Each structure stands twice: as C-alpha cells, then as structure tokens.
Image (spheres, helix red, strand yellow):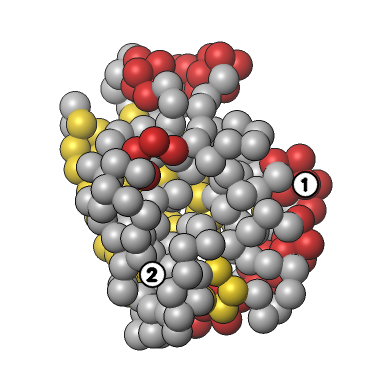
C-alpha cells in the first residue's frame, strides 16, 4: 500500500450502562454517532487507532468496545489511558481484530503503541522499560517511517490545569524520539481538543474526544461547546502526513458538569 489510512478515535469514556454519561454526554450513543459519521466518509481505512480512555473507570465498558469496533472487520489498535485499567483492557481485548500494545507494521509505516498510564494518577509517565522498548522498536524499523502513539500529551497545551496532568517525563520521551530520524509523527488523546504542530520536523497531533471537549487554553477546568469528533490520517510513502479533524453534527452536550 502506498498510503496508509488510519481513523483515530480517542477518549470514549464508555460506561457499563448503555445510558452512561460523562459531563452531560451519553458516551455510547455519542460514539455510535461518531462511527456513523466516519463510515459515511472515506471508509474503510486500513486500521482504526484508539488512543486511550476507552472506558470510564469501569472494565465492564470494554464489552461495548468489543461490540462497537469488533464488527467493523478492521484492525483496531488500542492503547490505555488514565481511566482505563491496562490489565483489564489487555484481557478484554485480547483477540482480533484488537491490538493492545507493541507495534504494527502497515505498508512502509510502523505504528508504535505506548502505555503512559500511572495507576491512580490522572497524569502519565513512560517507564524506563517503555522508553528502552521504544528506542529498540524505532531502531529496528528499517526503512519504515514511524508514528508514535500515546495517551498523555508530551508538550504543553497552554492550559494550566491540563498541563498538570500531562506526561511527567517529556524530556526522556523526546530524547528517544530525537535519536531516530524515521519518526514522522507523535499522536495522543487525553486533552479533549485538537492540536497540530511541528517539532524538529516531527508532526505533533492531538485529537478531540468522541464525547465532551475541554476548553482550549483554560487556566481552570472548563468544557468547550464543540461537538464530538475524530481524526483521519493519510500516512504517505514519502513520510508526510495528511490529516483532518472531523466534527460531527451531534449536539455537544445537553448539560454541564465538572464531575
């Protein structure tokens, strides 16, 4: 394949109950609307990318993940977020089409899935073992371009409250990234908003949630009025990335709560 096409969904926050809500949004219904919107576009992609917070602190929510994504007949590349329980996620999504860690090679691209979860904390970090594994995975990619995926943001979002719960050791992370010229992009979730920048020629991308969004550049926690969204990526053979955030026409939320 000359171009690898991915569709990214992030921060689903699914509950055990089908009617479960997060900050006024019925998360399962919202995800269903996002998937319907995606399937009306350039579908199917080569794989789906789900970058954390698949569930809202309840492992029973993974049953919805299996049902919603398992029927799409596409590889589903998942990594955990701070509201996930990594062991439960790996157990509940242990069979195809789900991949819950490591890396996947698609065409001339290597997609690397990192676990930045620190149990009991909203913020994240990459362990020495994870960083060493990332270094080896990038070194062994041969001529492939690399897209590195994690949940927690490794660069400031210029939002005081949110930047207190980002990646705790970004210097360690970027010291690995900077050693490998094949890294073309780094992508994450967690921030419930869009972000697109360049750092040393590497594309840095964050994607809004499939449910509620956070207000950008807010000093204190605040919700945005933007609707649920997802991202498409075209990973080209020359290492460039064409990408777009697509917003649904679903109402942003029907009530507001900072709970």
**Dot label at residue 229:** 2
**Dot label at residue 88:** 1
Q: Are marks 2 and 1 in contact (CB under 8 Å)?
A: no
Judged left or right of residue 4, residue 196 is left
User: Residue drawn 76% across and 56% down?
Assistant: 59
User: Residue drawn 56% across and 14% down?
Assistant: 128
Q: Position of residue 87 (x, y in %)?
A: 76, 40
User: Residue drawn 66% across and 34% down?
Assistant: 119
Label 1 Cα crowd, 10 Å radius (few <14 / some 14-19 / many 20+): some
N-terminal label among 2 and 1: 1
Mark 2 and mark 1: span between their CA atoms?
26 Å
> In which image quadrant can residue 114 be found?
top right
- Element assignment for label 2: strand
149 vs 145, nearest the viewer: 149
69 vs 25, nearest the viewer: 25
Label 2 Cα crowd, 10 Å radius (few <14 / some 14-19 / many 20+): many
- Element assignment for label 1: helix
Judged left or right of residue 98, residue 107 is left
226 vs 42, nearest the viewer: 226
Can residue 186 be seen from the camera position used here?
Answer: no
Q: Position of residue 213 (x, y in %)?
A: 38, 64
Q: Is residue 171 above or below residue 27?
A: above
Q: Is residue 73 above or below residue 100?
A: below
User: Residue drawn 47% across and 69% down?
Assistant: 257
Q: Position of residue 122 (x, y in %)?
A: 53, 41
183 vs 129, nearest the viewer: 129
């Amino acid at each position: 394949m000359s171009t690898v096409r991915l569709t990214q969904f992030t921060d689903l926050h699914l509950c055990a109950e089908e009617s479960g809500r997060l900050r006024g949004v019925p998360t399962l219904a919202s995800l269903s609307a996002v998937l319907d919107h995606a399937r009306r576009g350039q579908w199917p992609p080569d794989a789906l990318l789900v970058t954390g917070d698949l569930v809202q602190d309840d492992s029973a929510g993974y049953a919805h993940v299996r049902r919603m994504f398992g029927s799409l007949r596409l590889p589903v590349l998942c990594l955990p977020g701070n509201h996930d329980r990594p062991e439960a996620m790996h157990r509940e999504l242990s069979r195809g089409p789900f991949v819950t860690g490591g890396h996947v090679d698609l065409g001339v691209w290597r997609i690397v899935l990192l676990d930045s979860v620190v149990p009991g904390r909203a913020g994240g970090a990459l362990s020495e073992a994870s960083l060493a594994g990332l270094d080896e995975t990038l070194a062994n990619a041969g001529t492939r371009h690399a897209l590195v995926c994690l949940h927690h943001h490794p660069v400031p979002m210029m939002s005081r409250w949110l930047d207190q719960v980002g990646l705790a050791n970004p210097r360690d992370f970027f010291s690995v990234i900077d050693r490998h010229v094949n890294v073309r992009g780094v992508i994450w979730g967690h921030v419930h908003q869009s972000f697109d920048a360049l750092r040393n020629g590497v594309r840095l991308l964050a994607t809004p949630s499939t449910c509620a969004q956070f207000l950008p550049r807010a000093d204190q926690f605040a919700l945005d009025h933007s609707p649920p969204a997802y991202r498409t990526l075209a990973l080209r053979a020359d290492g460039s990335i064409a990408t777009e955030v697509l917003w649904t026409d679903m109402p942003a939320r029907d009530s507001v709560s900072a709970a």
